Every structure is written in C-alpha cells, then in structure tokens.
Amino acid sequence: MGLRKKNSVNRRDFLKNVAASAAVMATPAAASPSPASVTGTPGAIPVSAEEELRSLTPVEILTTERTGSDFMVDVIKSLDIEYVCANPGSSFRGLHESIVNYGGNSRPEFITCCHEESSVGMGHGYAKIAGKPLLVMAHGTVGLQHAAMAVYNAYCDRVPIVIIGGNILDATRRISQVEWSHSVQDAASILRDYVKWDDLPISLPHFGESAVRAYKIAMTPPMMPVLLIVDGELQENPVASDATLRVPKLTPTAAPQGDSGAVDEAARLLVAAENPVLIAGRAARTPAGMTYLLELAETLQIPVIDQMDRMNFPTRHPLNQTDRGRELISGADVILGLEVNDFWGALHAFRDQMERTSRPIARADAKTISINSANLSVKSNYQNFQRYAEVDVDIPADAEATLPALTEAVKRRMDAGRKNVFAERRAKLVDAHDQSLQHARDAAAYAWDASPISTARLSAEIWAQIKNEDWSLVSTATFVNRWPHRLWDFDKHHQYIGNAGGYGIGYNAPASVGAALANRKHGRLSVNIQCDGDLMYAPGVLWTAAHHRIPLLTVMHNNRAYHQEVMQVQIMANRHSRGIDRANIGTTLSDPPIDYAKLAQSMGVYGEGPISDPKDLGPAITRAMQVVKRGEPALIDVLTQPR
Amino acid sequence: MTGPTVTMLNTFLIAAVVSAPILGASQNSAAPPGGNAQNGKKVFEKLGCFRCHGSAGEGMPQTGKEAGPPKIASPHLSLQDFVRFVRAPKGQMPPFSAAQVSDDELSDVYAFLQAVASQPKVELPSTANAQNGQRLYSAFGCYECHGLQGQGSTQTGGVRIGPPQIPFSGFVAYVREPASQMPPYTSKVVSEAQLADIYVFLQSRPQAVPSKSIPLLNQ
C-alpha cells in the first residue's frame, strides 16, 4: 500500500499523446533540425534527435507505479482467494498484470485456462472441495457469453464463485474496433438471471466494498456465483490518492437457521413417526454437515436416501438406504427433505409415454418437512426452482446450520419408549442395508467380462487401486449407474462432490480439474470418471491440468455417444413407430472414433488406451496412478458399455 | 433374495406404482367367488402381473439358481388365500395393498386366472435364432437402456433382461405395452418373430458367476 502514483496521465491520454507525437514526427515542417545544426555550435550541449523531438512535444510520463488494479489485488488478497482462473482478455489486462506482478502471482495464482466455460467449471469443482470460491476473470462480453452455461450450472448447484468481467464503459476511451465489440452497456445482464448478485463499481472504494460484499453474498447460503463488472479505466488509471482507499474488512456471515418453532414441530413429527424417511439433497455443505446428519440419523434411526448432490452420508452406514428409496418413500408416514432440489419430484413417479403422466408415490397422509435454503433466493426467469411442493412444515433455512438445533429438539422429545422403537427400526435397516450391498455386488457380476467394459467392472477396478489412498471422486457418478456409491466405501466429505446442478454438459471435465486443484495441497488422489461427450465440449482443460501440474486420474467412460440423447431420440422414434435405425444421427461420436489417449498426450497429459479388454484395465490404472502420484494428470481411455 | 431379482423387484415396484391406479380401498374381507373374469384380465394387465407371470399366468421355469415367477393360472389356492398372498406375498413378489387393488378386483383376477388356462398362449417358436437376435438387439436399440449383454442399468431404468427373468409371453406383452419409461415397440417396428430371436439371444447370455467368487466385488 506504500506505492503512490507520480502523475495523472492515464492510459488513454498516453495513447492519445503518442498518436499526437507520431503525427508530429510525420510532419515535414516539424522535422528535427539536422545533426549539423545542433552539433556545430561551440559550447552547446549535444542533443540527440530524440531529445530534440521530445523538446517539441508535451512532456509525457509513460509509466506509473500504482494503478487501480493494484488496489483491487489488495482487496482480492484480503479475501484469501487462492486462484484466479482465466484465459487472457484485454478488458481486464490491468488486473491480470497486477495479479502476476504486483501480487506476485500468489494467492491468487493465475491459472491459465483455454475457455471461459473451463474457468467457471474449474471454480465450480474447486469450491465444492475447498468450501470457498476462487476468482474467474473474463471479458464482459464474449468472455461471459462463453462462461454462461457454466455459471448457470454453479447457480443451480448452489456453488460460490466470484466472477470479474472486464468492460470499457466510456465510449470515448475505446481505441479500436475490438474494444467497441468488447464493450457493453450492461455487461451483467447476460448472467443476471443466474447469479446471486452483481455490481458495477465506479470507483476504487466502491470496488473495495462491492468485492467484499460480493464475497459475503456468495458465501451465505444459498451459495451462488456473484459478478462484478470492472471497468478498464478503473483498473488502469493511476491511483489518485490513497488517503481514501482502504480495504473493507471481511466479516463472517452466519448461515440462516430455521425458525425454532418450526424446527420443534419437525422434531415432534419425526419422533412420533413409525416409518420416517430422510432425503438428503445438498444437505452437507461441509464435513461438519456430514457429522450433523449422521447424528440426527442415528438419534432417530431413520433411513437416509442420499440423492448424492453432495457427499451427505457414508455409503456403508447401515442407515444408508438409498437403493430402497422409492419403497421407503411409499411407506413413509413422515418425510424429511434436506436441501432437496425437487421435493415434488422425489414424491412422484413419472411416465414419459404418449402423454406425460405422474402419480404420487407417497402416502396421502404422509407429513412432509422441508429445510431448504433455496427458498431464500428464488428468481423468476429460469425454472430450476422446480414444481410446487405441498410441504407441511416448510423451513426456509440452511439445512446444515439447522441440523444441530433439530437434533437437540428431537432428543428433548425422546423417551425410553421411543428409543426402543428406534432401536427395533435400526435392526431391520441393518439387514436391508446388507442386502442392498449384496444385491449390488450380484448385479455387478453380470457382464463382468464383457467388452466393451461394463461400468460396474470399471468402477470395481478403480476402487481396488484407490481404496487405501486418501481419495476423492471429483466426477459425477450418475452416468455409470452410481456404481461407485453402490460398491465403494465413501465416508469422508471430500470423497464426492455431486453433479453439475443445471445438467449442462461440459461441467465434468473442468469441475474435476478444479476439484483436483483444491485437493492438491492436501495430497489427495483425485479420481475422475469422465464421459466422452462431456470432455469434447472444452478439452483444453487437460492442458491446464498439465501446465499447472494438477494431479488427477481420469478414466474415460467412453461409450462413443451422447448416450442420453440416443435414448431420447429412440423414445420419439418408437412413439411414432418409425424404428430407431436413425437414432444414431446427431447423437453418436463413433465415426471416426476419438482417440482420447492421443488427445491427452497432445496436451502434455499421460494418456493410454483405448482399452476394451477388462483384463487390461487394472494394469493401466496402476501405470496411470504412478504418474498421478508424481503430481501430474493422467488419462486412460476405456471403451465402455453405454451405461 | 439375490441381487438380480431385487433389481427386477425394484423395477417391478416402480412399474406397479406407475401402472396401478389409486383405487378406493376396500375394507371388506375377500370377496365371494364368482368374480368377473373379463374385468379380472384388465386388472391383471393394469397391475402389471403379466410382466412377471406372463400374459396367461404361465410363470417362468427355474433359470440357473434362481426360481422364476411361478405359474399362477388355474390357481390352486382358495380365493381367500390368494388375496392373502397378494397382500403379503413371500419371496420376491411385491405386496399389493388394498389401496392399489381392492378385494373385489382381486376376486375378478382370480376368476380370470381360473379361466385363462383354456386360452391360447404365446409360445416361443422353436425356430428362433439367437444370432439374429443379437443383431436385432443392437439394431432395435435394446442395448441403450439394458446394456449390450442385457445386464441392465439403474441410470436408464432398464432392468436386467439377460438371461430373461420372465416368460416369452410376458416379454412380448411388456415390449408392446411397457411400464415406466420404456418406449413401446409396436408390431409395426418389431415383429413377434423378431422378438423371439431377441428372446433366445437373451437366453444365451450367461448367468453371472457368483459375486462372492470375484475378489474385486468383495472389497
């Protein structure tokens, strides 16, 4: 903070004056005197042609030691932001330069990305491991346009990311066609529907307050991305006076807890219930959330159905009854939903045939309780708020913050009689859990030796080699039939990070790299089961992983198709009785087949495959693990069953 | 219970939930004999009974170590025992509550099953060709949800169908009028002869080795 500006000449003035100087140089009448005329005078101080020229033009001070962007870095550092993900853009060049030079490229460190969607996707995965946001920078126009889908995913997934978009608001300061094309009246408008807050600071003090405010808003449940549009002039102009500049203090914000009366009513219903069920969506934001959820579940001996939007509940805990979800819901008298994104959908069955139909699967007399922070921040345009659920006890609050109070309320209402009932319930659930695990193993045995390789075999081969490591599955498990959750032993919060949130394809590859970046300092083994179609959206993130030495084991689930869409086209073709022989058009990635090992190698990532014989998979994982343990990314291309 | 059968059971539950109308619960005990067989057939189909027991209630012979759904045509149980069993079955069959099907309706189903033995069944032709069935299995996109070996998928909702766990008549009936998310295949798209080829292809799929014999599945 000690460096001060020496002049008030800004970038635009500098450019304007350089242009003026150039014009002077090009004018014959203003040409410099001949060397003879200046050197032939006895006693005169010799001057060069450049010095002579300078004497004819206004004094220009071409450098400054401190700009607005330096102050911005001070603010960013005060937020303890570790990384900034971006591909470079002129509208934030001032901030870029200040980060790498003034800030020493440390906290935040610049992570070179190859697509703005990758930058945001990395921030998405990073936040779910680190528990805090990183910074993304992008052009306010073309950059945010590229970033938009990934921002929407993070918004739907309740993930904090701080985004800075560059812009040049003052039309008279734009110096080229490019800057006109990269300028916009309301840069935030493209994201406003799916960020929690945005601002356009017009002074450095304004930037300081807005940056800290943005961080707090992003980190207050429901967490979401936030956006600051930072003008190029504000970044690049010298700081006028430090007297008015200070970095605002970041103060903690308490997560919103549920109303005490409503929480007590929820406890009353849960204690009295004979067949309660707990559905966990994004319930555990942090490791503490898992602990709280475990305590509540064990206090009530309540079966838990994990929707796997976060790592909520240990997979091998006897109360984890995820595989019996529908059966349990249909018999439940009280249903508790914790941060369940689609509560209505959890209680209904659907059929997508000639007409779309739905039918309740829960008992008509079942009481429902919802604790969901999403109700605290609802927007209109995008419809991810889902269908209206008729909830009996609706608590708009953060579930993790409310769980301790709910558990205490439950304990206050329990008596010896209820404890006995709960103990009996647990005994049945233990048996059911053991059966579910055995059923999963039996099902996995089918097509065990098939080629292409079954997703069950793929998952089991990975598990065999990571189970004794400090591992973290940083990819979605949905597209491999949840086999990891059915076969692996998950018991730590960092072992799973959930899904995209908005179902936007292209999330998984960058999110896995971002999560691996967050895992790196902990020495964890990050594992990514990567769908082929998703990787093809922006495969340049592999280069980012290689460039920044981000250790990540990627195992391709290469079914050579956007398989979900193959099935969608099939549904339409069958509905019209036209056969499905053309369902591959527009949905498959098989002609020519994509060589993902070579794709990885081309970007400096260890690559191996394609592997189609299941016997070859284990040794390939072993080799790739050795690379990852050296601190580098590795990819194995595996030809797999469709799902 | 074994894993594969539970997969089937889960799906059956889904199918039953989706297919079964929410009917008014009957508080009566089992209705007297003499139900309406015609209505019983409708209820039988509506509840999805055919999906396991076949369209004529013929059941499924034991395959490998697994007992298939039993023959229920010409039930030897009394009506009262039949109703009692449907309400609280043993083995893999899911229970059907009075909210899903009334005692009167079960009486009609009972009548249908008594009459059905005399009706023609869909027989698996002896000429069915597994090799052609394998080709058709891919061509008709069955693999998309059920996997290339018929192993099934929880994500798609396609149950394990290799080897089949239901009789051929049930297989045909299900393909024509599937429950849940499966798209229907009309006879315009796939003939019964082609379905027979697919069925015998699925029959040729090996039973899984016991999971306990696979070290990777016991970690």
Image (cartoon, rainbow, N blue to C red):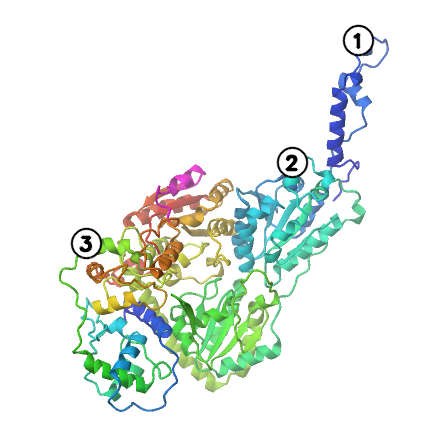
How crowded pointer 1 is (Cα within 10 Å; few <14, some 14-19, many 20+) is rated as few
Mark 1, secondary structure of its residue: helix
User: Circle 2 marks a residue in which chain?
Assistant: A
Q: Report if residue A637 is visible in the image.
A: yes
Instruction: Tell me which chain the residue with mark 3 is part of.
Output: B
Q: Name above or below for residue B110 compared with residue A326.
A: below
Q: Residues within 10 Å of mark 2 (few under 14, many from 20)?
A: few
* Same chain, labels 2 and 3: no
Q: Is residue A93 left or right of residue A496?
A: right
Q: Residue at x 53, y 52 (%)?
A: A149
Does the CB distance between marks 1 and 2 fall below 8 Å?
no
**Type of amino acid at the residue the image marks with label 3:** Gln
In the rendered structure, which disc, 1 or 2, sits on the residue that comes first in sequence?
Answer: 1
Residue A39 quadrant: top right
Residue at label 1?
A36
Which residue is label 2 attached to? A177
